């Protein structure tokens, strides 16, 4: 079912692209680029079923959850429609998510109240724990781009949308011990997360022409997950904001 939706989505993109290209009177101007971004990733919380503890749970999560660093990397095909407009289609791997930070941990009195026995205090316990949740996906973005200026350095703005297929989830648990040492453990995600999402996006930046055949683009870009990531009383919408850099070569 997922692959049928992907095929349908790609077919719509191709039909739309072919229609736009057919209306253009400009000669074909294709380019291909390697594109990547470094992102600040986080989520917004949404209460689906109001309960007596829902608001308190959201407040608690807002106190201990923070953004994490993520990234994208992929290949993009561009077609200039005219001297100012272009349509880009891309396939990319994406790492999104957020993290939970618990510091200044204490564990109470080590004395057993029943017998007065004092437990072995030599056992190492962490003073801080960070849990980083990663969402790995394959994204298929399509973006319309507008160029302005005619010099070597042009301005560029873009708007688009990406279909995102979740590949897997996993978590990294980082424990800071009392002596300052750090332990890292990884585990695969177990939540029943939704496999499909849609990410509208906007960007703005500059396109620097290196020579007749190549250019480099620097674009701050924002993406927001329109669909919830899990069916639960309290769910999340993932988002990211970062700097996208691409190297493009004319075909």
Image (tube, grey):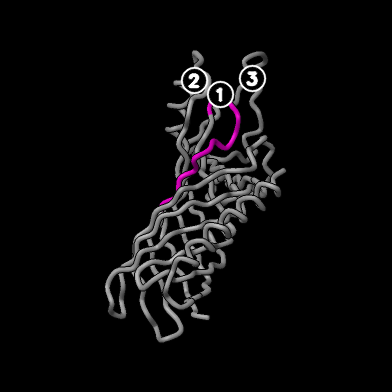
Q: Earlier in the sequence, mark 1 or mark 3?
A: 3
Name the residue rendered at 53%, 31% in the picture: 235
Residue 204 lies left or right of residue 40; in this view the side is left
Q: As drawn, is 186 to the left or to the right of 34?
A: right
Q: Which residue is mark 1?
A: 233
Q: Does dot 2 land on a helix, a strand or a loop?
A: helix
Image point (63%, 38%), residue name: 194
Q: Is the residue under label 1 in contact with that under label 2 (CB below 8 Å)?
A: yes
Q: Does the segment drawn in magenta span residue 5?
A: no
Q: Quadrant of residue 2?
A: top right
Neighbour class for label 3 at 10 Å: few (<14), some, many (≥20)? few
- Location of residue 213 in the rendering, given as x and y in whole percent from the top left corner: 46, 84
- SS for tag 3? loop
The one of 141 and 228 positioned closer to us in this rendering: 141
Q: Earlier in the sequence, mark 2 or mark 1?
A: 2
Quadrant assignment for the N terminus: top right
Sequence-wise first label, 3 or 2: 2
Q: At 46% across and 60% down in the image, what residue appears?
A: 38
221 left or right of 13 in image: left
**Which residue has dot 2 on it?**
54
Q: Foreground: 38 or 20? A: 20
Q: Is residue 53 above or below residue 247?
A: above
- Please state the extent of the stretch shown in magenta in the rendering: 222-234
**Could you tell me if residue 58 is visible in this image?**
yes
Disc number lying in front (2 or 1)? 1
Q: Residue 117, how many percent across, how many down? A: 66, 22
Give the labeled residue for mark 3: 112
* Residue 128 x %, y %: 52, 41
Judged by its main secondary structure, the magenta piece is loop
């Amino acid at each position: 079912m997922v692959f049928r939706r992907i095929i349908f989505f790609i077919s719509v993109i191709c039909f739309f692209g072919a229609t736009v290209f057919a209306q253009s009177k400009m000669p074909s101007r294709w380019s291909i680029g390697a594109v990547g971004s470094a992102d600040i990733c986080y989520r917004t919380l949404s209460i689906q079923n109001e309960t007596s503890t829902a608001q308190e749970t959201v407040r608690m999560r807002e106190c201990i959850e923070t953004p994490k660093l993520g990234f994208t990397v992929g290949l993009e095909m561009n077609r200039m429609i005219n001297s100012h407009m272009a349509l880009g289609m891309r396939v990319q791997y994406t790492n999104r998510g957020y993290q939970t930070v618990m510091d200044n941990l204490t564990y109470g009195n080590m004395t057993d109240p029943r017998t007065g026995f004092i437990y072995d205090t030599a056992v190492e316990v962490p003073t801080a724990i960070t849990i980083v949740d990663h969402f790995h996906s394959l994204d298929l973005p399509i973006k319309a781009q507008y160029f302005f200026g005619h010099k070597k350095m042009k301005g560029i703005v873009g708007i688009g949308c990406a279909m995102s297929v979740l590949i897997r989830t996993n978590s990294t648990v980082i424990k800071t011990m009392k002596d300052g040492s750090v332990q890292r453990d990884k585990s695969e995600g177990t939540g029943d997360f939704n496999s499909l999402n849609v990410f509208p996006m906007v960007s703005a930046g500059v396109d620097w022409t290196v020579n007749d055949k190549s250019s480099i683009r620097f674009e701050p870009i924002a993406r927001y997950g329109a669909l919830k990531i899990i069916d639960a009383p309290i769910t999340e919408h993932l988002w990211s904001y970062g700097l996208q850099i691409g190297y493009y070569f004319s075909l």
